[in-house]
Amino acid sequence: MAHLFSPLTLRNVTLKNRVMVSPMCQYSSVEGMPTDWHMVHLGSRAVGGAGLVMVEASAVSPEGRISPGDSGIWSDSQAVEFGRITRFIRDQGSVPAIQLAHAGRKASTDVLWKGGGPLLIGRDAQAWEPMAPSAIPFDKGYAMPREMNRADIDKVVADFESAARRSLAAGFEVIELHMAHGYLLHEFLSPLANHRGDEFGGSLENRMRLPLRVARAVRAAWPATLPLFVRISATDWAEGGWDLEQSIQLSRALKEIGVDLMDCSSGALVPYAKIPAGPGYQVPFAAAIREKAGIATGAVGMITEPAQANEIIESGKADAVLLARQMLRDPYWPLHAAKALGKDVTWPVQYGRGK
């Protein structure tokens, strides 16, 4: 029976345990370039014993950033700089991963500690025009996004494919495609954000068309030996929106393309969603998709306690847990969790006296 500190093998990559560091925006990049902050932030989580350490949502193009402080991988120089970080993560026995993203209509916002509000052209010097499947702003006060045409759609696919190739050059061993949290690919999936009348809107098949095109392009560019993850919002938590049943159908289609794990989050498409947040509240999505789509899943959302995380794995609800805020509070959570669960794991030799 698998437990939190049993290895997990996906394709030719083996994680030493089932604890993954979720992608967490740091808003500390300069023109998309990772900085020393990223080296220390990500490196310390690898030192802390996580099986996989994932870089924050990294834009596949400048216009795909959430904020001016987002990391990106649209240039070769960014890939080179990420190479320093992936080498360090790997040297600590963890697997380096990156989440590829396009913010869609939620692009051009300020960094979190400055309020995270919209940056508007004509008012803010750093603003740029967001784009989306339909000309529907995220919320009051946000810019009206430009409805994407066919050339825009084709460029997004090409941008994701190029980012995948750069991710390989940078030394990443796992890519995760961001199809969640109200960003571009999620916007195409949800009927609340996608009102198109062409082959990219309307039916579920049409709304899935662009996300599946992106997944195929990335899978073709990414070595067959390396895993591909997808993060989804399993529900919009809003009437008439994306839901679990559609998520199961999407997961089946992604599995056929060659996706290896579904990272099951939820929400963030519309500001009026009513989310019943609480410990483990999103775990049932991972369990349902694992069972009904027959694909490995990662569970996320207010997973904080070692016994809680271990039970998710032992009971077969998910194949891995992805921790975010708990990892901000405690970069060494995996080492502390192992002790709490009575599992003997290797510490960095430099920290042996602490063990």
Image: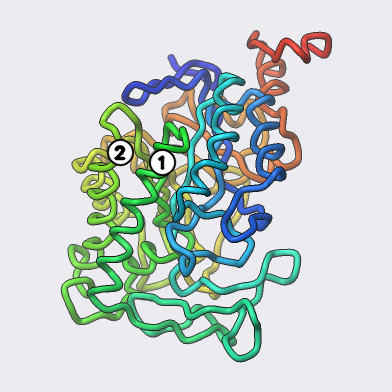
Q: Is 61 left, or right, of 5 in this rendering?
A: left
Q: Residues within 10 Å of mark 1 (few under 14, many from 20)?
A: many
Q: Residue at x 66, y 32 (%)?
A: 43
Q: Position of residue 305 (x, y in %)?
A: 67, 32
Q: Nearer the viewer, residue 203 or 61?
A: 61
- Give 248 or 329, whichever is nearer the viewer: 329
Amino acid bearing label 1: Ile
Provide the secondary structure element on which disc 2 rests. loop
Q: Give the numbered dot on residue 355.
A: none
Against 274, residue 81 (above or below) is above
Whether 191 is drawn above or below 166: the answer is below
Within 10 Å of the Cα at label 2, are there few (<14), some (14-19), or many (20+) other Cα atoms? Answer: many
- Which residue is painted at 56% across and 28% down in the image? 87
Q: Residue at x 24, y 40 (%)?
A: 255
Residue 101 lies, in percent from the top left, at: 44, 56
- The quadrant holding residue 174 is top left
Q: Which residue is mark 1?
A: 175
Q: Position of residue 310 (x, y in %)?
A: 56, 25
Q: Nearer the viewer, residue 122 or 258?
A: 122
- Three-letter code, disc 2: Trp
Q: Is residue 331 above or below residue 123?
A: above
- Circle number at residue 222: 2
Q: Are marks 1 and 2 in contact (CB under 8 Å)?
A: yes
First-in-chain label (1 vs 2)? 1
Q: How is the image coloured?
A: rainbow
Q: Of the residues tagged 1 and 2, which is closer to the observer?
A: 2
Q: CA distance from mark 1 to mark 2?
A: 8 Å
State the residue at coordinates (64%, 58%).
30
Residue ranking furthest to the front: 77
Q: Secondary structure at mark 1?
A: strand
Quadrant (top left/top right/bottom left/bottom right) for the C terminus: top right
Position in image of residue 195 (x %, y %)? 29, 80
